[in-house]
Image: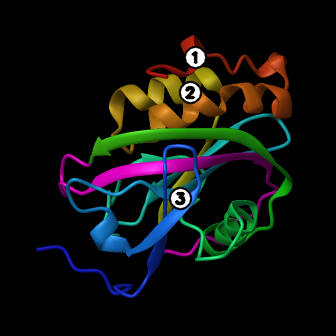
């Protein structure tokens, strides 16, 4: 049985076009068959163009201990996705992102193999820069690393990543290339499984 301390967290339900159609409690939205809801994913890079990837805390109710993008989450009701993304980067990583820009949206519907929880999200993508040091919140992030594309590809072979990572990375790649430049070779074939 899954329980979460944030049982009163309410998410914004949306239709296939991203228009608000209602709201649902967080766990209910992630329980089969899942309800399409607004979310965001952030990809952050250091000054050399390496991507920040985090390993989710082992105490998280959903997808604990897996590697994923720099930051992700859900806006509060009435909160703009951009504002939510900047807020969560600060809360989870202890830094303020620089040059945070929208990189489009993507949708996915997948199941976490360990918990059985459903990810059915209308996901707003953001790309930005970050300056270490980071001051991570251990209730959210257990560790983090910065990767070049070849390093990330190799890391993904040996480590478990979130079920949504490939989808959000593939959708964000055009924005990533605009933000960090083609010199870093952020292409689907360089990062693997995208």
Q: Nearer the viewer, mark 3 or mark 1?
A: 3
User: Disc number at residue 160?
Assistant: none
Between 175 and 89, the one lying in front of the other is 175
Q: Please tell me how crowded label 1 is: few (under 14), some (14-19), or many (20+) other residues with Cα within 10 Å.
A: some
Asked whether disc 2 touches disc 3, contact meaning CB atoms under 8 Å apart, the reply is no
Say whether disc 1 or disc 2 marks the residue closer to the N-terminus: 2
Q: Is residue 129 left or right of residue 168?
A: right
Q: Which residue is mark 2?
A: 170
How far across and how far down the image is residue 129, in percent?
Answer: 81, 49
Q: Position of residue 169 (x, y in %)?
A: 56, 33
- Which residue is painted at 47% across and 69% down in the image? 22
For label 2, the SS is helix
Residue 48 seen in this snapshot: yes
Kindly check if marks 3 and 1 are in contact, taking CB atoms under 8 A apart as contact: no
Q: Which residue is mark 3?
A: 38
Q: Earlier in the sequence, mark 3 or mark 1?
A: 3
Q: Are marks 1 and 2 in contact (CB under 8 Å)?
A: yes
Gap in Å between the C-alphas at discs 3 and 1? 25 Å
Q: Nearer the viewer, residue 168 or 184?
A: 168
Of labels 2 and 3, earlier in sequence is 3
Q: Quick check: can you spot residue 61? A: no
Q: In the image, is residue 126 part of the stretch drawn in magenta? A: yes
Magenta residue span: 112-139
Q: Farthest residue toward the top?
A: 189
Please state which of residues 64 and 42 is positioned toward the viewer in this rendering.
42
> Which quadrant of the figure has residue 51?
top right
Residue located beneath label 1 in the image: 188
Q: Position of residue 188 (x, y in %)?
A: 58, 16
């Amino acid at each position: 049985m899954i329980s979460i301390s944030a049982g009163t967290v309410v998410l914004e339900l949306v239709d296939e076009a991203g228009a608000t159609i209602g709201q649902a409690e967080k766990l209910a939205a992630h329980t089969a068959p899942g309800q399409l809801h607004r979310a965001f994913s952030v990809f952050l890079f250091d000054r050399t163009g390496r991507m920040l990837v985090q390993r989710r805390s082992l105490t998280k109710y959903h997808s604990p201990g897996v590697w994923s993008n720099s930051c992700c989450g859900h806006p509060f009701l009435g909160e703009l996705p951009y504002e939510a993304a900047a807020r969560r980067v600060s809360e989870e990583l202890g830094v303020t992102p620089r040059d945070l820009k929208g990189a489009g949206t993507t949708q996915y519907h997948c199941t976490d193999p360990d918990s059985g929880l459903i990810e059915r999200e209308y996901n707003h993508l953001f790309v930005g820069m970050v300056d270490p040091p980071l001051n991570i919140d251990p209730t959210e992030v257990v560790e983090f690393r910065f990767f070049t594309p070849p390093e990330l590809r190799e890391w993904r072979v040996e480590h478990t990543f979130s079920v949504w990572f490939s989808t959000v990375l593939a959708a964000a790649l055009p924005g990533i290339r605009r933000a960090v430049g083609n010199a870093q070779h952020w292409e689907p074939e360089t990062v693997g499984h995208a």
